[in-house]
Image (cartoon, coloured by chain):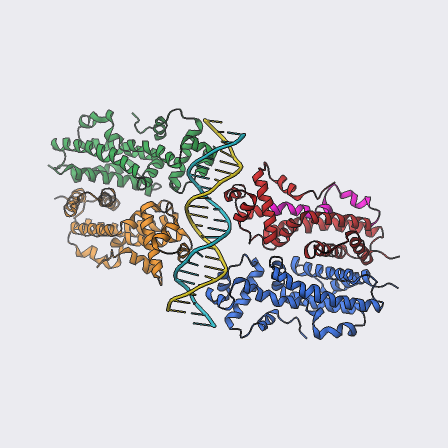
Chain colours: A orange, B green, C blue, D red, E cyan, F yellow
Amino acid sequence: MQEYQDMLDVILENEEKITEKQKKILEAAIEIFSEKGFASTSTSEIAKRAGVAEGTIFRHYRTKKDLLLAIVGPVMSKIAAPFVTRGIHKLLDTEFDSFTDLLRAIIHNRQEFMRNNMPLFKIFVQEISFHPELKDQFFQHVSKQLANRMFHIIKSYQEKGQLIDLPPKYIFQFILSVIFGHLIARNVLFPDKNWDDEKDIDIMIQLIMNGIGKKF
Amino acid sequence: MQEYQDMLDVILENEEKITEKQKKILEAAIEIFSEKGFASTSTSEIAKRAGVAEGTIFRHYRTKKDLLLAIVGPVMSKIAAPFVTRGIHKLLDTEFDSFTDLLRAIIHNRQEFMRNNMPLFKIFVQEISFHPELKDQFFQHVSKQLANRMFHIIKSYQEKGQLIDLPPKYIFQFILSVIFGHLIARNVLFPDKNWDDEKDIDIMIQLIMNGIGKKF
Amino acid sequence: MQEYQDMLDVILENEEKITEKQKKILEAAIEIFSEKGFASTSTSEIAKRAGVAEGTIFRHYRTKKDLLLAIVGPVMSKIAAPFVTRGIHKLLDTEFDSFTDLLRAIIHNRQEFMRNNMPLFKIFVQEISFHPELKDQFFQHVSKQLANRMFHIIKSYQEKGQLIDLPPKYIFQFILSVIFGHLIARNVLFPDKNWDDEKDIDIMIQLIMNGIGKKF
Amino acid sequence: MQEYQDMLDVILENEEKITEKQKKILEAAIEIFSEKGFASTSTSEIAKRAGVAEGTIFRHYRTKKDLLLAIVGPVMSKIAAPFVTRGIHKLLDTEFDSFTDLLRAIIHNRQEFMRNNMPLFKIFVQEISFHPELKDQFFQHVSKQLANRMFHIIKSYQEKGQLIDLPPKYIFQFILSVIFGHLIARNVLFPDKNWDDEKDIDIMIQLIMNGIGKKF
DNA sequence: GATGAATGAGACTTCATTCAT
DNA sequence: GATGAATGAAGTCTCATTCAT
């Protein structure tokens, strides 16, 4: 189902009639932005790594910042994707017998996404603080859409008696914290450690469900 | 006890014979680095906000990066502080009857620290990725010292039968995730929401202890 | 008789086999050159306003400067036109009983020309200082041809006893100054004022003839 | 009395604490702007001719346009100066017995000004069309102040019976046209011809006074 | 004939850093 | 210690022009 298809494709789809050079520019920009940060990256360096003339960058992106937005914009919708995607909508409510299974699916999904898109994720996290438009877009997508969606789901599982009775926002933040804490440790802080992903996920799920699962 | 004394004082202590202008420079730099990021901040802007001449900055800090390090360096030791500080050493093992109380103390402490030092924290998080020396220092302080220290503590509470038997690293990461997840939501993402800190902390502790506390 | 026919037609005649696009390019170039000056106008802006591709401009005009010359060149001959034009040649000497009538005809004619060709006139005046070839051409056309022609005419009216005895160059420059002074005030400096053209011209003629007419 | 003192001094007075380099920059800019026009002049060329680093220009003038304004701004007040200057105010009405003498004084004065400030005048005339701020300032200074002042003077001489009864605006425009027509021919179009200034001025005055002087 | 992607030289501008005062 | 003018390298961006399609 591959919704965490290569993000580059997603970015490319957002533009019409991509030339080969334009693709090279995007790839190079993603790499270098992620390595050194947006502000410390020079367009001349991007041009060099992309193998194009510097002017070519500006034929496609009016400013350096436009280039950043072309990269980061589409990321937004995909970060919240698996929680929000229409296709998955019903699955979430019905297909999973237990919240535990749902959790496992989400974690796997996001883990896969991160593994495939670390550079983009890094750029995203770094730059969101400094570009208010990004921040606004982000809240639209995530805070509004994703959170509402998840609150719904959580409530439905509370009604099934699988989760403790606590305002969903606490549960949501708790889950998110644990998952992202793990993902960041796993992929950002200590990517080189020997991780046993399956085991880690099992334990994580166990701890989460201890925390919010209803005990009998 | 005030170990989360104003970080600026900590920074100032690190230098000898601070002049008034130098203090102004540090304050201005912290503000602007935090607002726009290190790379996007110009020394001339710092000079202007500090009310000094451009040259004055370089009389005290040989390069712009030296200025960054003078700011970020001391932060490091204080981020890990309450877990590591000598003075608190014994407290941790003995003074708290329950892990729950310890947890509460730690959370309060870090929450206080963050509230007082948001700009510094932001600079720290932003720049650590881009400056390998910082990254190394950080792992020395935190990953080595703090983690080891915490593993110890966790084990001691496991032996007291208060915590489930799970390799401490999982427990440590779990706790850290939940706490920092909350702190970031609280102070970075949605600082303007109406938060009820006491209640939030209670719930957080409840969820954590559900997760890792031993059930009878 | 329409010698102040639309200058664009004159320009177009100078080229062979004009395509529709080429015409659009010329129109756009005239507009923008006149608004912002040659040096501040980009070929891409011309292309955009003309609704053609950037490359198309260079298919017709090897360089941006060639485009300017294609526009400004023909203007030259027409600025001096009514004084020089063959067809009008004899008219000048014979047809007007009085110098006053000749003057009136010339003024009306140039006024009409200016009204119809302000943008071209502006370009011409702006760019002539910066392009020596233009300057040279201009002196060929105007200084040589027009001045000589006018000297002749002035002399003939002096012989008829209608003009004071003064070297024609003074009379010529005097007339030119007053006419162009008025035209510039009328069309360039204050085009939006309420002008009463007929009255203005009458007064201008009166003042000129006071100045150079023979008194009895 | 030297009110057409070197304009450069006037420009320099407008700024406080001019450095040697800054003066060099202004001189170089005036020269090159006047030779090639503002838009075709590169800051690097100015820097080279001024013998400074390119960056130095921007320490003193935030943008290239600011540099233009620093040059052209002060010109404005001085172009209209001799007509408007307070000091000369009374002189105009009383000191000259005849309008002819006043005229001669004005012409000499402006001729002197132009000779000393051709480059500045050229820049002024070239750029005023393209920079609306300039145009506005110009109308404030000249159209408003100068014209009103002159209308007054003309009326007073009409009352003395020295000038014909015609709305002053016509007389004003007529005089201006003849004077500037001559000045431009003299200094801009044919500066290299052999001019006999005294004779030219005499004739010009004669023609003007023929035009507007009251005949007995 | 027309297109528009690509180029690379060069434009304006910023900036960390130096140094004479 | 403090200043701020000066620097020049480097940054972002523009533009006339070329060329494959």
Q: Can you tell which quarter of the image residue A84 is in?
A: bottom left
Residue B209 at least partly seen: no
> Which residue is pictured at 65% across the width and 49% down the height?
D140
User: Residue D111 location in percent, x, y?
Assistant: 73, 50
- Which part of the image, by quadrant, shows the C terminus of chain A? top left
Q: Can you tell which quarter of the image residue B34 is in?
A: top left
Residue A40 at least partly seen: yes
Instruction: Point out the stretch of residues depicted in magenta.
Output: D71-98
Q: Residue furthest left?
A: B216
Would residue B51 appear left or right of C134 to someone viewing this image?
left
Would residue C158 appear left or right of C126 to someone viewing this image?
right
User: Residue D96 location in percent, x, y?
Assistant: 82, 46
User: Residue C91 location in percent, x, y?
Assistant: 75, 74
User: Which is nearer the eye, C145 or A142?
Assistant: C145
User: Which is nearer the eye, C80 or A67?
Assistant: C80
Would residue C193 appear left or right of A39 to someone viewing this image?
right
Q: Is residue A58 above or below residue A169?
A: below
Q: Main secondary structure of the magenta part?
A: helix
> Which residue is pictured at 34% across the width and 61% down the height?
A20
